[in-house]
Amino acid sequence: MEKEKKQHTQIYVVCGKTDMRKGIDGLASVIVQNKEDKLFEQEAIFLFCGGKKDRYKALYWEKDGFSLLYKRLENGKLKWPKESEEEYILLNDQQYRWLLEGLSINQPKAVKEAKAGDLLKNLR
């Protein structure tokens, strides 16, 4: 019997302000009306932030339903991405940590991930 491979949880930040009075159903409806059904084929976390930027909600899709987490920061604010061309941004693990540490998800001085083509260039 083959062991089922665990897929990596996708982390999406919902850009701009969200009405933080919304509960689990209200936030889930924002996701459902703006995303394709295939998004729900794997586990995903959707992050929402209000205007104060000192609190956020995380909606976690576990393939059988949603869980909701709410956090209020006691000191500091989040550098939440503003409205952009895309309503959602898929974050990598590093961007997720930066965001929740109060940093921008785009760090210009950070070492970037290498691509296969970069490796070949450097070996020549």
Image: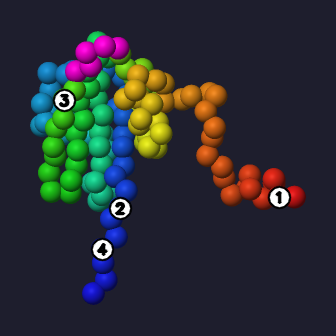
Q: CA distance from mark 4 to mark 3?
A: 31 Å
Which residue is depicted at the point 13% across and 36% down?
24
Question: Quick one: quadrant of the N terminus?
Answer: bottom left
Mark number, residue 4: 4
User: Outermost residue toward the bottom?
Assistant: 1
Q: CA distance from mark 1 to mark 4?
A: 37 Å
Q: Nearer the viewer, mark 2 or mark 1?
A: 1
The type of residue carrying mark 4 is Glu
Reply yes or no: does residue 3 show up in magenta: no
> Which numbered disc, 2 or 1, marks the residue that appears first in the sequence?
2
Question: Quick one: quadrant of the C terminus?
Answer: bottom right
> Which numbered disc, 1 or 4, marks the residue that appears first in the sequence?
4
Q: Is residue 84 above or below residue 115?
A: above
> Which numbered disc, 3 or 1, marks the residue that appears first in the sequence?
3
* SS state under label 3: strand
Q: Magenta span covers which residues?
A: 72-76
Mark number, residue 70: 3
Q: CA distance from mark 2 to mark 1?
A: 33 Å
Q: CA distance from mark 4 to mark 2?
A: 9 Å
The type of residue carrying mark 3 is Tyr
Which residue is depicted at the point 41% across and 22% down?
102
Residue where numbered disc 2 is placed: 7
Which residue is depicted at the point 37% across and 56% down?
8
The type of residue carrying mark 2 is Gln
* SS state under label 2: loop
Q: Secondary structure of the magenta portion, mostly?
A: loop
